[in-house]
Amino acid sequence: MIIKTAEFVISNTDYRKCPQEGKPEYAFIGRSNVGKSSLINMLANRKGLAMTSSTPGKTMLINHFVINDEWYLVDLPGYGYARRGKENRERLRAIIEDYILEREQMTNLFVLVDSRLEPQKIDLEFMEWLGENAIPFAIVFTKADKLGTGRLQMNIEAYREKLLETWEELPPIFVTSSEKGQGRDELLNYIEAVNKSLKNS
Protein backbone atom coordinates (compact mmCIF):
# COMPACT_ATOMS: atom_id res chain seq x y z
CA MET A 1 0.00 0.00 0.00
CA ILE A 2 1.27 3.45 -0.90
CA ILE A 3 0.30 6.24 1.50
CA LYS A 4 -0.70 9.22 -0.63
CA THR A 5 -2.44 11.29 2.04
CA ALA A 6 -2.54 11.23 5.83
CA GLU A 7 -4.54 13.91 7.62
CA PHE A 8 -5.49 14.52 11.22
CA VAL A 9 -9.29 14.63 11.51
CA ILE A 10 -10.49 14.86 15.12
CA SER A 11 -9.68 14.15 18.78
CA ASN A 12 -12.27 12.83 21.22
CA THR A 13 -12.79 11.25 24.59
CA ASP A 14 -16.14 9.77 23.51
CA TYR A 15 -16.35 7.05 20.84
CA ARG A 16 -19.84 8.28 19.88
CA LYS A 17 -18.37 11.56 18.63
CA CYS A 18 -15.84 9.82 16.37
CA PRO A 19 -16.30 10.03 12.55
CA GLN A 20 -19.54 8.44 11.39
CA GLU A 21 -19.12 7.67 7.68
CA GLY A 22 -18.24 4.04 8.33
CA LYS A 23 -14.67 3.78 7.03
CA PRO A 24 -12.71 0.89 8.59
CA GLU A 25 -10.61 1.88 11.59
CA TYR A 26 -7.25 0.43 12.63
CA ALA A 27 -6.43 1.40 16.18
CA PHE A 28 -3.01 1.44 17.86
CA ILE A 29 -2.55 1.01 21.58
CA GLY A 30 0.21 0.13 24.02
CA ARG A 31 1.76 0.95 27.33
CA SER A 32 3.11 4.45 27.82
CA ASN A 33 6.46 5.00 26.13
CA VAL A 34 6.20 1.97 23.84
CA GLY A 35 6.91 4.14 20.77
CA LYS A 36 3.35 4.46 19.47
CA SER A 37 3.56 7.98 18.04
CA SER A 38 6.86 7.19 16.30
CA LEU A 39 5.33 4.06 14.76
CA ILE A 40 2.26 5.96 13.53
CA ASN A 41 4.46 8.67 11.98
CA MET A 42 6.61 5.98 10.32
CA LEU A 43 3.57 4.18 8.90
CA ALA A 44 2.01 7.37 7.56
CA ASN A 45 5.40 8.63 6.35
CA ARG A 46 4.68 11.96 8.06
CA LYS A 47 7.10 13.12 10.74
CA GLY A 48 4.82 15.16 12.96
CA LEU A 49 1.46 13.48 12.32
CA ALA A 50 1.16 11.96 15.79
CA MET A 51 2.82 14.04 18.48
CA THR A 52 5.69 12.25 20.19
CA SER A 53 6.28 13.27 23.78
CA SER A 54 9.10 12.69 26.23
CA THR A 55 6.45 12.63 28.97
CA PRO A 56 4.87 9.17 29.10
CA GLY A 57 1.10 8.97 29.19
CA LYS A 58 0.39 12.29 27.44
CA THR A 59 -2.31 11.03 25.04
CA MET A 60 -5.65 11.21 26.84
CA LEU A 61 -7.64 11.30 23.61
CA ILE A 62 -8.81 9.10 20.76
CA ASN A 63 -7.10 10.63 17.70
CA HIS A 64 -8.38 9.90 14.18
CA PHE A 65 -6.19 10.26 11.08
CA VAL A 66 -7.68 9.56 7.66
CA ILE A 67 -5.36 7.66 5.30
CA ASN A 68 -5.77 7.86 1.50
CA ASP A 69 -9.38 8.91 2.20
CA GLU A 70 -10.08 5.17 2.60
CA TRP A 71 -9.48 4.19 6.22
CA TYR A 72 -8.77 5.64 9.63
CA LEU A 73 -5.65 5.17 11.66
CA VAL A 74 -6.67 5.64 15.30
CA ASP A 75 -4.22 6.61 18.02
CA LEU A 76 -5.61 5.44 21.37
CA PRO A 77 -4.38 6.55 24.80
CA GLY A 78 -1.61 4.44 26.33
CA TYR A 79 -2.52 2.21 29.24
CA GLY A 80 -0.76 1.47 32.50
CA TYR A 81 0.97 4.74 33.29
CA ALA A 82 1.36 4.39 37.06
CA ARG A 83 1.87 8.04 37.94
CA ARG A 84 -1.65 9.06 36.98
CA GLY A 85 -4.07 9.56 39.87
CA LYS A 86 -6.66 6.81 40.39
CA GLU A 87 -9.47 8.99 39.04
CA ASN A 88 -7.52 9.75 35.87
CA ARG A 89 -6.65 6.08 35.39
CA GLU A 90 -10.30 5.08 35.70
CA ARG A 91 -11.37 7.77 33.24
CA LEU A 92 -8.73 6.63 30.77
CA ARG A 93 -9.77 3.00 31.16
CA ALA A 94 -13.37 3.95 30.37
CA ILE A 95 -12.31 5.89 27.21
CA ILE A 96 -10.25 2.95 25.94
CA GLU A 97 -12.73 0.20 26.84
CA ASP A 98 -15.74 2.06 25.43
CA TYR A 99 -13.97 2.61 22.11
CA ILE A 100 -12.73 -0.98 21.83
CA LEU A 101 -16.01 -2.63 22.86
CA GLU A 102 -18.55 -0.26 21.32
CA ARG A 103 -16.96 1.13 18.16
CA GLU A 104 -18.39 -0.91 15.29
CA GLN A 105 -16.01 0.59 12.74
CA MET A 106 -12.95 -0.70 14.60
CA THR A 107 -11.62 -3.39 12.28
CA ASN A 108 -8.40 -4.34 14.04
CA LEU A 109 -6.48 -3.33 17.12
CA PHE A 110 -2.68 -3.28 16.99
CA VAL A 111 -1.23 -3.89 20.45
CA LEU A 112 2.27 -2.45 20.69
CA VAL A 113 4.83 -4.25 22.84
CA ASP A 114 8.42 -3.15 23.58
CA SER A 115 10.60 -5.90 22.10
CA ARG A 116 13.39 -5.19 24.62
CA LEU A 117 11.35 -6.36 27.61
CA GLU A 118 10.32 -9.79 28.82
CA PRO A 119 6.55 -10.46 28.74
CA GLN A 120 4.85 -7.86 30.93
CA LYS A 121 1.86 -8.78 33.09
CA ILE A 122 -0.09 -5.67 32.06
CA ASP A 123 0.26 -6.47 28.33
CA LEU A 124 -0.66 -10.13 28.81
CA GLU A 125 -3.73 -9.22 30.88
CA PHE A 126 -4.82 -6.68 28.28
CA MET A 127 -4.53 -9.27 25.47
CA GLU A 128 -6.42 -11.77 27.62
CA TRP A 129 -9.21 -9.21 28.00
CA LEU A 130 -9.28 -8.67 24.22
CA GLY A 131 -9.55 -12.42 23.70
CA GLU A 132 -12.40 -12.74 26.19
CA ASN A 133 -14.27 -10.00 24.32
CA ALA A 134 -13.49 -11.47 20.87
CA ILE A 135 -11.69 -8.31 19.71
CA PRO A 136 -9.57 -8.86 16.56
CA PHE A 137 -6.02 -7.78 17.29
CA ALA A 138 -2.40 -8.16 16.20
CA ILE A 139 0.79 -7.81 18.23
CA VAL A 140 3.37 -5.27 17.09
CA PHE A 141 6.84 -5.49 18.62
CA THR A 142 8.49 -2.05 18.63
CA LYS A 143 12.09 -0.82 18.90
CA ALA A 144 13.53 -3.91 17.19
CA ASP A 145 16.65 -1.94 16.18
CA LYS A 146 17.62 -1.59 19.85
CA LEU A 147 18.48 -5.31 20.12
CA GLY A 148 20.72 -7.78 18.35
CA THR A 149 18.87 -10.30 16.16
CA GLY A 150 19.47 -13.22 18.54
CA ARG A 151 18.18 -11.38 21.58
CA LEU A 152 15.18 -10.05 19.62
CA GLN A 153 14.22 -13.58 18.50
CA MET A 154 14.59 -14.85 22.08
CA ASN A 155 12.30 -12.14 23.45
CA ILE A 156 9.65 -12.73 20.78
CA GLU A 157 9.83 -16.49 21.35
CA ALA A 158 9.40 -15.93 25.10
CA TYR A 159 6.24 -13.96 24.32
CA ARG A 160 4.90 -16.68 22.01
CA GLU A 161 5.47 -19.35 24.64
CA LYS A 162 3.80 -17.26 27.34
CA LEU A 163 0.77 -16.59 25.14
CA LEU A 164 0.47 -20.23 24.10
CA GLU A 165 -0.06 -21.15 27.75
CA THR A 166 -3.57 -19.73 27.42
CA TRP A 167 -4.13 -19.26 23.65
CA GLU A 168 -4.74 -22.07 21.19
CA GLU A 169 -3.84 -19.84 18.27
CA LEU A 170 -1.72 -16.71 18.22
CA PRO A 171 -2.78 -13.42 16.61
CA PRO A 172 -0.65 -12.00 13.76
CA ILE A 173 2.75 -10.77 14.97
CA PHE A 174 4.74 -7.90 13.43
CA VAL A 175 8.27 -6.76 14.27
CA THR A 176 8.98 -3.06 13.73
CA SER A 177 11.56 -0.33 14.11
CA SER A 178 10.35 3.24 13.61
CA GLU A 179 13.91 4.47 13.14
CA LYS A 180 14.76 1.94 10.44
CA GLY A 181 11.32 1.71 8.83
CA GLN A 182 11.26 -2.02 9.59
CA GLY A 183 7.84 -3.70 9.44
CA ARG A 184 6.17 -0.79 7.66
CA ASP A 185 5.37 -2.69 4.44
CA GLU A 186 4.16 -5.75 6.35
CA LEU A 187 1.75 -3.72 8.49
CA LEU A 188 0.40 -1.68 5.58
CA ASN A 189 0.01 -4.80 3.40
CA TYR A 190 -1.91 -6.47 6.23
CA ILE A 191 -4.26 -3.47 6.50
CA GLU A 192 -4.69 -3.43 2.72
CA ALA A 193 -5.55 -7.15 2.66
CA VAL A 194 -8.15 -6.70 5.41
CA ASN A 195 -9.65 -3.69 3.59
CA LYS A 196 -9.92 -5.75 0.39
CA SER A 197 -11.61 -8.62 2.20
CA LEU A 198 -14.11 -6.16 3.73
CA LYS A 199 -14.98 -4.80 0.28
CA ASN A 200 -15.50 -8.31 -1.05
CA SER A 201 -17.58 -9.57 1.85
Image (cartoon, rainbow, N blue to C red):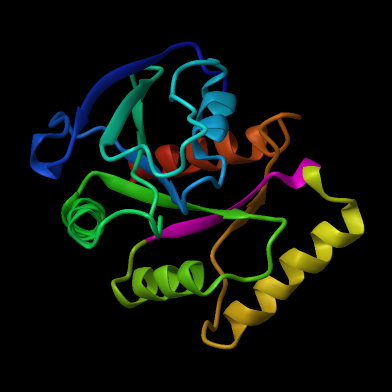
Outermost residue on the left side: it is 16
- Does residue 182 show up? yes
The residues colored magenta run: 136-145
What secondary structure prevails in the magenta region? strand
The quadrant in which residue 182 appears is top right
Q: Say if 188 sits above or below 150 in the image.
A: above
Magenta-span inclusion, residue 123: no
Q: Position of residue 199 (x, y in %)?
A: 34, 38
The quadrant in which residue 160 appears is bottom right
Residue depicted at 46% across the width and 42% down the height = 56
Relative to 132, 55 lies left or right: right
Q: Position of residue 95 (x, y in %)?
A: 20, 51
Relative to 109, 88 lies left or right: left
Residue depicted at 75% across the width and 71% down the height = 157
Q: Say if 75 sits above or below 151 in the image.
A: above
Residue depicted at 66% across the width and 32% down the height = 178
The quadrant in which residue 74 appears is top left
- Does residue 200 show up? no
Q: How many marks?
A: 0
Residue depicted at 32% across the width and 18% down the height = 8
